[in-house]
Image (cartoon, rainbow, N blue to C red):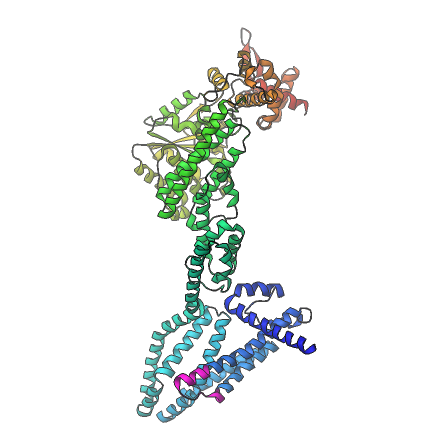
Amino acid sequence: MNRKNTAARFWQYIAECARLLYWSYFKPYTLERWLQEIHPELKRDRNPFALRAEFASNRRLHRYADQVWWLSATLIPLVLLVIGLLFSLVVRETFDWPRSTLLLLVWFVGLLLARLNVKKLESWSKQALWILSGSLVVLVVSSDITNKQLTNTINSTLIFSRPMLALFFAILFVGIIFSLDFLEIFILSSFLTILFTWFLIFRKNFAILAEKEPIIKVIFIGFILLGLNIILWPITLFISVIISTLRFYLWLPEFLWTIALFQLSRFRRSASALLRYLPPYFDELISLPLPFMDRLIADAYRENRAAARQTIDYLIASTNQQRAAARAMTLIAVDSLSSCQTLGDIVAIAEQLAWFPSPPPAQLGPILPQFLEISQSVRSAADATSAYRKIELLNSPIAALKRLAYSSAFSKNADLAARSGSIAQRWQATLEAARRTLEEESRYSQEIPPAYISGPSLDPETAKKRFKGRQDIFREIETVALSPQPPVLLLYGGRRTGKTSALKYLPEKVGGELVPLLVDMQGGATATTLRSLARYLAEQIIEAALRSRNLELPYPNKRDLDEDPFPALQRWLQEVEQRAPGKRFLLCLDEFERLSEVVRETKSRSPLNFLRHVMQHRQQWILLFSGSHTLDELDDYWSDYLINTQSLRLTYLQEEEARELIVAPVEDFPDIYQPEAVARIVELTRCQPYLVQLLCSTLVEELNRKAAGADPRATKATAADVEAIVPKALETGGMYFKNLWDTLGDQERQAIARLLRGEPATPEDSSAWRKLEQKEVLEIAATGEASATEARSFQVPLVRRYIEKAIEEM
């Protein structure tokens, strides 16, 4: 029984050594992970005996060190034995076994030093080898010898050529097994060059020459040999790289094996079962391409997604086949996107491909993220609570698919462009069919459509014709911008008065000779350097030109932007003018006050100097600053830059415009209001566009809730219904009212409090009244014949109700 156990342990030890040898040559990444499990500091190229102190507590480490040592001690003699036998058979000369065995002693001495891990002894041994080599050179060069002596010296040295050459190839073989790096390949190829030159080509000729010619000529011939070394070195380097790195001798059978697997998958119709037989599972170092492997993985993904993903993860983390993994992911993405036939398929694809890295493989470019973003938009539409809202939310992905189909025509990858364009058209047809179905359902729906948007700015692409009024503002902007010497425009107004919405609708409201370019400076305020701000401005201008007028502008020179940002932008603006002659560019800087943050962050006014240069010297460019502050509310330095400014104030809607927004926010909106309800909404909001949207959306939501299955349109909303939803509206729009309250100073709040309590005003209140009037909180009207007294009241009743509550809580 003990003998059986001993034999079993012996063969297990041999099997572990064989596995270690196999991993070293074929699966080094697996070996690295295995070594990390043994000890966190253990590496393939590290002497395990350096960790001898931990052998007692880590038996796996001790066992690994012994196995490495025994492999190193036995492998070289075995390889040398094979090479010697092959040499004797091929050359038909007796191999010099005694001298080869003698040379092996040096190898075993090195192994002994490695096992002892004595740093000083290793250092002394290296020094001794250098001294021995140097002594040989000194003996040949500096000794007083004749030509014949030189010949004898060389011949006596070359006696060791055969065993040295055999030992060299043995060590080279073992070195390849243990995955030598490029530096070692360089050294080995150089040594191989010298051996080829001296021992295989010029050995006999040089000996004969040395007997007949003087020593000077021999040295001259030596220089010729050195030149031949230089010529032969690239050849031997190439051979060494092929042997040690590309491993061409293994790639050919793996190449044929991969083709066989692919053909077998076509025959058996089961690609996922063949994944574990792919060559990278056996050879992690293969770096040359393997045909059809990416296609095989993509086919397997249809059958077994988990197995295909596991294979891709393995190729990325544990092999040199990352490009094959990227190609497989590209095929999987295209196949998955192409397979979407229904609205549910499009919704599910974003989650299905969520495992793709970000950014995705370069072969996919920006196409995959765009499709996934569209899928997420479709999911939002599918999750909407009403058919009308679903229709509204589907408009955005349908428009995005139209743009994607158009832009794919300009892709550099023709095959990917064709497939992505086809996918976009198929998705668009699916979404449009779903939208038509929803439109048919909405006609028979008893729900009032939630057509009001009380939140973000209106986007023409999704909000359509919800934007009402402001025709006077649009006409004035167009007239000023197209005048011979237009001034700088300042569009200002309170929060949520529709400034951003107006700028977004501007391209639809002005003539084609004017190109509105909307730049959101809230994004620009995130810039911490002038370079990043200049790059942001250029990107926003290019996107805005394409969006507003389908005008493609050139990109500025990136190197120039990095070196000197704003002078580079000035030159770029001139290039833009040449690209679109006859056009005028209206550069609209929304939330322009945020530029002050960039000035403070960068401690530079270069952005403002750039804008002033544009005002003064670029005739085709007109600047429009949009914000909630007037010039006297900005930092003092702004007055130096905003010279010759024409102000445009955006305030309340006209009553007719507000009534249109209430009763007809979109086409075919049902008649749900009694006249007194409309009048009450106008009164409570004073036609402030955001508050109108807020009250109406809250009212529609409440009417639909109360109906509880009945038709909410059967009974029209009354003034009492409007009054009942005011508390809910104040809660829903709480952030708007809170922001307004937070902008008021203490003096202004105290003045309002005295007004609400009916207390007399103090002398200090006069300045507070003016500020409150500018902020559209109060209005002041003169009373009496001599207008000596003033009547003060809140401009918007809804604002009054919120402030009354806020003061009660003070």
Figure quadrant of the C terminus: top right
Determine whether 328 is above or below 159 in the image.
Answer: above
Of residues 59 and 126, the one nearer the viewer is 59
Q: Quick check: can you spot residue 732?
A: yes
Figure quadrant of the N terminus: bottom right
Q: Main secondary structure of the magenta part?
A: helix
In the rendered image, residue 507, in percent from the top left (x then y), is placed at 39, 29
Of residues 59 and 427, the one nearer the viewer is 427
Left or right? Give the position of 622 relative to 77. Answer: left
Identity of the residue furthest to the top in this view: 785
In the rendered image, residue 292, in percent from the top left (x then y), is placed at 42, 57
Residue 707 falls in which quadrant of the image?
A: top right
Residue 796 falls in which quadrant of the image?
A: top right
In the rendered image, residue 172, in percent from the top left (x then y), is placed at 47, 75
Determine whether 289 is above or below 369 in the image.
Answer: below
Left or right? Give the position of 228 relative to 341. Answer: left
The magenta-colored residue range is: 83-99
In the rendered image, residue 792, in percent from the top left (x then y), is placed at 58, 15
